[in-house]
Image: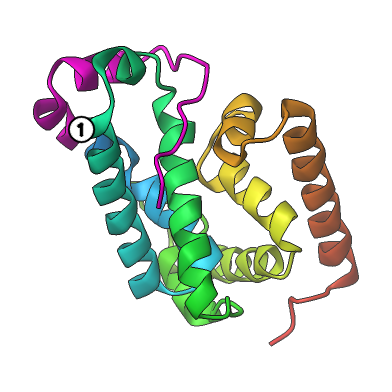
Amino acid sequence: MGAVAAAPMETGDGLAERLAADLDGAFEELVVTHQDRLYAFALRLTGSPSDAEEVAQDAFVRAHRALAGYPAERVRALAVRPWLFRIALNVVRNWARGKRLREFPLDALAEGGWEPAAATRERPEEAVGRAEGDAELAALVAGLPPRYRTTVVLRYVADLGYEEVAAALGQPVGTAKSNVHRGVRLLRARMADGIGTEA
């Protein structure tokens, strides 16, 4: 994989500055900060927990290699989140060349949840109902056309803003917004019609 271009926006959290000053010291912070969402993003695109773990690990390895080769000024100017998710998306695309992306197994998705689990206690019947809803929603997302699925997952699973989604995909912000909105409309229509929610 070639070097991924830096996105021309600041994230405001100072991580890029810390990475520029001390890559090895700050890289653990980058991993800890982004590992859960990066894994969730990869899981929604691959449908496999083990493949998602490999994608996330490979993305971090590639990110470290790229950062080590960048001059400090380039690292300081980096919008870290969209840049990292762009690397992960490229890893998924490379992975998909050898494997056909498959439909998500509902039991694995219910186990993984739609987003990283919240640290709340709930009654068992609530947890079961939420897991079933999460699995149905994840199955519907899996059935979206790839351009909509990727933008919806970046926006709502990875929690990237529209500018970050656009930067991660290398497209104009208007295109990213349009694809997210179309993806959400498709999801709503399919939920209303009950498509993809039956076992």
The answer to which of 79 and 124 lies nearer the viewer is 79
For the rendered model, the colour scheme is rainbow
Identify which amino acid the numbered label 1 is placed on: Ala
Q: Residue furthest left?
A: 25
Q: Is the residue 199 above or below the residue 193 in the image?
A: below
Name the element at disc 1: helix
Identify the magenta region. 1-28
Where on the picture, by quarter, is residue 33? top left
**Residue 117 shows in this picture:** no
Quadrant showing the C terminus:
bottom right
Neighbours of disc 1 within 10 Å: few (<14), some (14-19), many (20+) = some
In the image, taking residue 196 as reference, residue 58 lies left or right, namely: left
Residue at 38% from the left image edge and 71% from the top image edge: 51
The answer to which of 179 and 129 lies nearer the viewer is 179
Where on the picture, by quarter, is residue 67? top left
- Residue 189, percent across and down? 89, 60
Q: Is the residue 48 above or below the residue 127 in the image?
A: below
Residue at 42% from the left image edge and 65% from the top image edge: 112
In the image, taking residue 72 as reference, residue 128 lies left or right, namely: right
Residue at 84% from the left image edge and 73% from the top image edge: 194
Q: Residue furthest bottom?
A: 199
Q: How many marks?
A: 1
- Residue 73, percent across and down? 31, 12
- Residue 72, percent across and down? 25, 16
In the image, taking residue 68 as reference, residue 191 lies left or right, namely: right
Q: Is residue 2 located in the magenta-colored stretch of the structure? A: yes
In the image, taking residue 171 as reference, residue 127 lies left or right, namely: left
Q: Is residue 182 located in the magenta-colored stretch of the structure? A: no
Q: Which residue is mark 1?
A: 68
Residue at 79% from the left image edge and 58% from the top image edge: 187
**Residue 18 shows in this picture:** yes
